[in-house]
Image (spheres, rainbow, N blue to C red):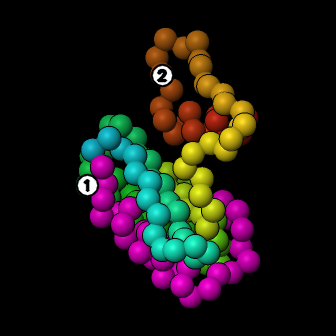
Amino acid sequence: SCFTSDGFPPTYEQNLEQLFHSLVDSVPSDGFDNTSIGEAPNTAYGLALFRSDASADICRNRTAIAAETIKAKCPNGRSAMIWHSSCLLRYSDKRFFEPSVGARRWGYHTPRTRPLPIDRQAGILWTH
């Protein structure tokens, strides 16, 4: 999903490209990475999240595919998110890593005896 598509200056575009490379190159063993590149007002913030059963090679590959896909689908997007197979990729020109002061906190619980696959859990969370 493209959240904002009003274009961006060349400096943000360069930072965004570096951000994608950083997220692809630094696939962590715990399946989660967030980072930022550049100085305000052109800082690019990014997050990559992977399924726990995916290997580092799969995560790296899926993140690279997600980055290319999101650039094609949101060519002028200052902020976007994509779920590609076993990988979530999100970027923005606004910091989104921590909850805002006073933000509502919520949890997710399902009474199932077996957990849902992460793809389905993510879909449920984003539609509710």
Badge 1 amino acid? Asp
Q: Which residues are magenta?
A: 1-28
Badge 2 amino acid? Pro
Element at badge 1? Answer: helix
Q: Which residue is mark 2?
A: 115
Residue drawn at x 26%, y 50% as measured from the top left: 56
Element at badge 2? Answer: loop
Q: Is residue 111 left or right of residue 115?
A: right
Distance of label 2 from label 1 (alpha carbons): 25 Å
Q: Which residue is mark 1?
A: 57
The local crowd at label 2, few if under 14, some if 14 to 19, many if 20 or more residues have their Cα within 10 Å, is few
Rendered position, 3 above or below 71: above
Instruction: Residue 94: give x, y in percent of width and height.
Output: 63, 62
Which one is in front, 121 or 29?
A: 29
Which one is in front, 95 or 75?
A: 95
Rendered position, 20 above or below 27: below
Please say if the residues under marks 2 and 1 sit with CB atoms less than 8 Å apart.
no
Tell how many labels: 2
Please give the label number shown on residue 17.
Answer: none
Residue drawn at x 55%, y 50% as measured from the top left: 97
Residue drawn at x 71%, y 38% as measured from the top left: 103
Which one is in front, 48 or 110?
A: 48
The local crowd at label 1, few if under 14, some if 14 to 19, many if 20 or more residues have their Cα within 10 Å, is few
Instruction: Residue 15: give x, y in percent of width and height.
Output: 48, 77
Going from the N terminus, do you reach mark 2 or mark 1 first?
Answer: 1
Instruction: Residue 1: give x, y in percent of width and height.
Output: 66, 60
Q: Is residue 83 magenta?
A: no
Instruction: Residue 91: give x, y in percent of width and height.
Output: 55, 62
